[in-house]
Structure formats: C-alpha cells, structure tokens
Amino acid sequence: MKKYEPLPKSLFIENRERFCQELAPNSMAIFMANELFLKNADATYSFKQNSNLYYLTGIDQEETVLILYPDHPNPDLREVLFLRKTNKEIEIWEGHKYTQDEAREASGIANIQWTEQLDTFLYSMLHLCENVYWDFNEHDRDSARTITKTHYFAEKIRNLYPAHTYKRSAPILNRLRMVKSPHEVEAIKKAIEITEKAFRRVMKFIKPGVTEYEIEAEIIHEFIRNRATGHAYDPIIASGKNACVLHYIANNQVCKDGEVILMDFGACYANYNADLTRCLPVSGKFTKRQKDVYNAVLSVMKQAKELLKVGNTIDKYHEQVGEIMTEELLKLGLLSTDEVKHQNPKYPAYKKYFMHGTSHHLGLDVHDVNNKYLPMQAGYVYTCEPGIYIPEEGLGIRLENNILITEQGNIDLMANIPLEVEEIESIMQS
C-alpha cells in the first residue's frame, strides 16, 4: 500500500458521523477523488488525494467516490464507497490497488462497490433524496478555480434532476477540519518529527560552496527514508538575497561564506503536513547584524505564539503582531518614528520589511481550510512565521514553528527543533 502507516479507521468513522450530523434532512453528499492530470505524452503528475475525501474515508487512491446518505431507509445505503476495480493488467503495470476488504478495514465503510456500478446506485438514491451536497475542493485563497471532473458530473446530475436542491459541503467540512482530533495531531507530529531529522541533517551539511539543490537533496533523502510521502510543498532553499523572494523555489545557487540561508520545508506524512522555516549562517556563525535581525524575528515569534489562544481572531492577531514587529524594526533602525507616526493604517510601515501574514492553518493542506471570522478554538493548528526581509542587505530572516491551541494554552509542536542562535552555531560548528 502506501509508505506511511495507515491512520486508524476510527478517525474517518468519527469524521463521517460529525459531517452527516450537519446535513439538512434527507440529503445526500457526493465526494470524488482528485484526477490524474496529464504532464506530457502519456506521463501524469503524482497523484494527490482530494483532502475532503481522504478526511472522510482514509482512502488514498484515484477513481474513488463516496456517497453519504444518512437518512436513507436502507441502512446499507447510508454509506457507499466506490473503488476502481483492478485486474491482472492493472496489477502488472501499476501495482496493487485496494481490495474491497482492505477498503472496509481502512475506512470503516461496510458497503464497498466498484466505480463501474456508481451510476446504478446513484440514480436510484437520487430518486429518494431532496438535497445533494457537492464538494468542489474550495479554498478562500484559490483565485484561479480549476474545472474538475466533479464540476462536469455535478452539471450532468443537475440536468437530469433539476428540481433537487443543491448545496456545498465546504462550509461544513471547513469548520470541522479546522479543529484537529488527537489522531490528526499525531499525524502532524509524525510529519514534524521527520522534518526535524532532515533539518538536523542539513545543519551538519551546510558550508560555503554547497549548492541550494544539494541541500534540497539531503532533505528529501531524509524524508523518504523515514516513510514520508515527500515534500509537503515545494521547498524554499534560499541563500543570501534569494531569501528576500518569498516563494523562491529555483534552489540553484551556490551558498557563499558570510551569507544566511533561509530554508522553508516540511514533510508530508499520511497526507498531513509539517511547515518549518529556519535560517542558518553558511559559515556556521552569524555576523552581529545577522544575529540582531535574527533575534528580532525570534522575539516577534515568541510574542506572537502567546497570542495564538482560544478566543482571539486571526485578523486581530495579525494587527497585534504588526505592532510587535514595528517595535523591532524601530530598534533595528529600519523604520523611523516619523514613518510610523505618518503610516497608512491600511498598509502599515512595517509591511515594507514584513509583507506576509504571520500564521495560517495547517493540516491536510499546508494552507489548510479556514474561516478567519471564527474565534480561535482548541484543536486549531497554526503556523507562526514572522520574517524580516532587507533586499538592500541581501538578508532575509523568517522563523516558523507549528502551534497547537488547547484550552490550557498553546503547545509548540516544534519546540525540540533548534531555534536559538547559540544552539544553532554550536551544532553547526561541532
């Protein structure tokens, strides 16, 4: 099956129960796997499962469809999972696929059918239900919507059954997914554990003359040998002035003596993600200026972490962090009191050197689903990643840890990963 150990089916059973409780009476919800997208010729991109389908089933395979109909008169039809039917040829060319028994064990769903039977089941169930919920893989940061197989299928069903009421699953699932269960937190912690191993590996590897791509290679080596699926996202390995490019992924430059290298990377394990950023001196020792800027960012990070707590809101939090960052930039001489006094409230002065947000949700997606208007709750997992970018000095510093909010306060899930200047220099020089 997969590289990673499967998560317990109790997680997916509970997720389905919580989702179904939110549906309108006599409703059916349909979830479809992500498609295999063509790269070139007959090659496809690596498959990545639809996060909502995985959240509800634990099934990590293409051509999977889930139908939930909790009010169906026949208990056997309240949960039906459809799988791609395998054969000898598929097994020879692509390898093993889920059997029906394996899918039952992974998902906790008793009724497993082959995808070729989908239409027969679906149309008979549609005659009974009044509402149909669709999952269009929505995200508030997605400005370029992609038309998927689900869109075409939904249009087909609308044409055949125009009198039904059609609804979105996203508002329900986004709210549910924001609160991480203990099993989900354990999966994130496993991804973090693998990420820490990779970071400690490259701390000993980095020196003047190595290339950014060699560092990237060391990271993926450690990921794969520890059963990660791979990178949670394209890694940023940015030395010197490259660190001032927020989404730098070229990773093709030589790391020079006297530079600081910014590394933003994380492992993906069982579809859950880690998101770490650390900055290291290529020579093994920071200059005074580099240390001052680093410690300024570290100070903001420590104060920002304390603001991630039950009841706060993300907008208010970002305003609070902006005020803290402003004070640090004043101390560094990057801002003047006059600039701050006459700043535009809609674009504060600090944004010249810190232009991105401090935190985002983390989970099945690196930028996990969210509703920024809801107060923070226990079970939210946030990144905390302030930064200062000074292009004229060829210096960019960002530090990032992953934080779990609880009723008793927050927990830094990356507390064991070296962060203080003295510890970093000591390890690099040992």
Image (spheres, helix red, strand yellow):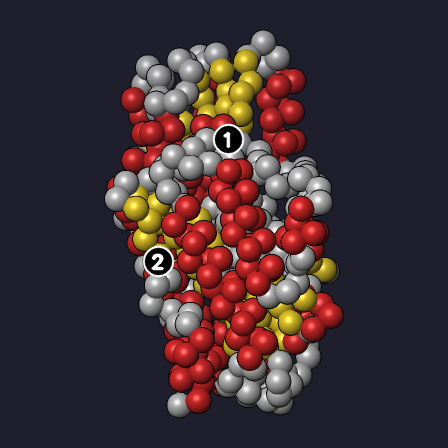
Count neighbours of disc 2 (C-alpha within 10 A) and say few if under 14, some if 14 to 19, many if 20 or more.
some
Q: Within 10 Å of the Cα at label 1, are there few (<14), some (14-19), or many (20+) other Cα atoms? A: few
Please tell me in which quadrant of the rendered image residue 389 appears.
bottom right
Badge count: 2
Residue 240 lies in quadrant = bottom right
Residue ID at (42%, 16%): 24
178 horizontally vs 182: left or right:
right
Secondary structure beneath dot 2 equals loop
Please determine whether, in this image, residue 126 is positioned above or below residue 309: above
Tag of residue 373? 1
Which residue is at a point 55% across and 59% down the rendered structure image? 328
Give the camera-side residue of 229 and 189.
189
The amino acid type of the residue labelled 1 equals Tyr
Instruction: Specify whether residue 160 is in view.
Output: yes
In percent of the image, x 52 and y 49: which residue is there?
Answer: 321
Q: Secondary structure at mark 1?
A: loop
The Cα atoms of the two marked residues, 1 and 2, are separated by 25 Å
Percent of width and height locating residue 162: 61, 12
Residue 163 placement, left or right of 272: right
Q: Amino acid at mark 2?
A: Leu
Seen in the image, is 179 located left or right of residue 132? left
Of residue 144 and residue 387, the one placed in the foreground of this image is 387
- Image quadrant holding the N terminus, namely bottom left
Quarter of the image for the C terminus: give it. Answer: bottom left
Q: Provide the residue designation for mark 2.
A: 413
